[in-house]
Amino acid sequence: MRIPIVAGNWKMHKTVDEAVVFVNEIKDQLPPADQLQTALAAPTLCLMPMKQAAVGSPLKLMAENCYYKDAGAYTGETSPYALYQAGIHHVILGHSERRNYFHEDDALINKKVAAALRNGLCPIVCCDDTMGRRVADDDKVHWVVARILADLQGLSPANIRKVTIAYEPNWAIGSGQSADPNQAAEGCYLIRQTISDMYGDAVANDVRILYGGSVTPDNVTAMMNQQDIDGVLVGADSLDARTFLEIVNH
């Protein structure tokens, strides 16, 4: 059974003090983790103070990125080994902003996914529609097959089960314009079918697939009610504690 998840992605927002205040505001109002998992991805500087503030709550904390090496002369990068040793066991990889602003390609993301799994981290792998093409005769999104094949190349079925996929249409991120629930469901369905083609139905049925892109309290229920959508990755509306709680407790 796939437990749904609501994950917030703060990007480069909030100071350490602001992050701790946020955790204290929400930590006692979250649903049990066996019903819905709640997670926040925050700047690396904030993670340890947030982890201390969240003790005893179901809140999970995630890194927003990591490198594909455990250690070395890589100034400014975050080690997946160090994250795991610090008790941060989830990481977002391949977000469209990493792809666009920092020129990360599928080959690099594939290395990062493998490194995260090697170190015990559970990655959320993001797929945007930068490569998207809609074909006139059937109006299907075909880009996702190539992207998933590249990002997950070489992973074992056991490791695939530890990966969460987030479908984030590039035009919907930060725009205030969300995909229609049917469009979102189509992308998530094609991702699951791609994983099924790669690893079989049993593995595909265990993988959680999220929708991300202008998720709000007004559209979260419609998204979460779609068969192949197992949760949401929330951007701007995860920055306000009250709004984030509305989404979590939709």
Image (tube, rainbow, N blue to C red):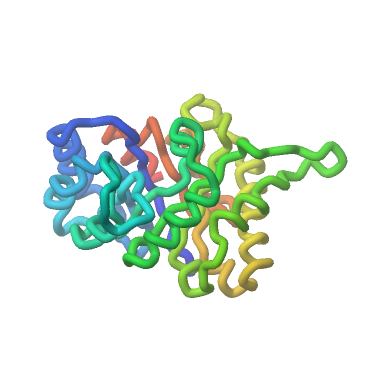
Q: Farthest front residue? A: 73
Query: Left or right of 94: which side holds 118?
Result: left
Q: Is residue 246 visible?
A: yes
Image quarter where the C terminus lies is: top left
Q: Is residue 222 visible?
A: no
Residue at (48% x, 50% y) in the render: 108
Query: Could you say where residue 91 lies in the image, as x and y percent from the top left?
Result: 35, 52
Horizontal side of 87 relative to 110 (left or right) equals: left
Seen from this angle, which residue lies furthest right? 137
Quarter of the image where one finds residue 181: top right
Query: Along the line of sight, which residue is nearer the eye, 240 or 167?
Result: 167
Determine the image quadrant of residue 177: top right
Tell me if residue 129 comes above or below residue 119 in the rendering: above
Dividing the picture into quadrants, the one containing residue 24 is: top left
Relative image position of residue 155 (x, y in whole percent): 52, 68
50 or 115: nearer the viewer: 115
The residue at 66%/60% (across/down) is 194
Of residues 128 and 29, the one drawn nearer to the viewer in this rendering:
128
Residue 220 vs 207, above or below: the answer is above
Report how many numbered discs are placed on residues in the image. 0
**How far across and how far down the image is residue 68, in percent?**
38, 55
Which residue is found at the position 64% from the left and 47% from the top? 187
- Position of residue 108 relative to residue 118, above or below, is above
Q: Residue at x 48, y 74 (%)?
A: 158
- 62 displayed left or right of 149: left
In front here: 191 or 81?
A: 81
Q: Position of residue 6 (x, y in %)?
A: 39, 49
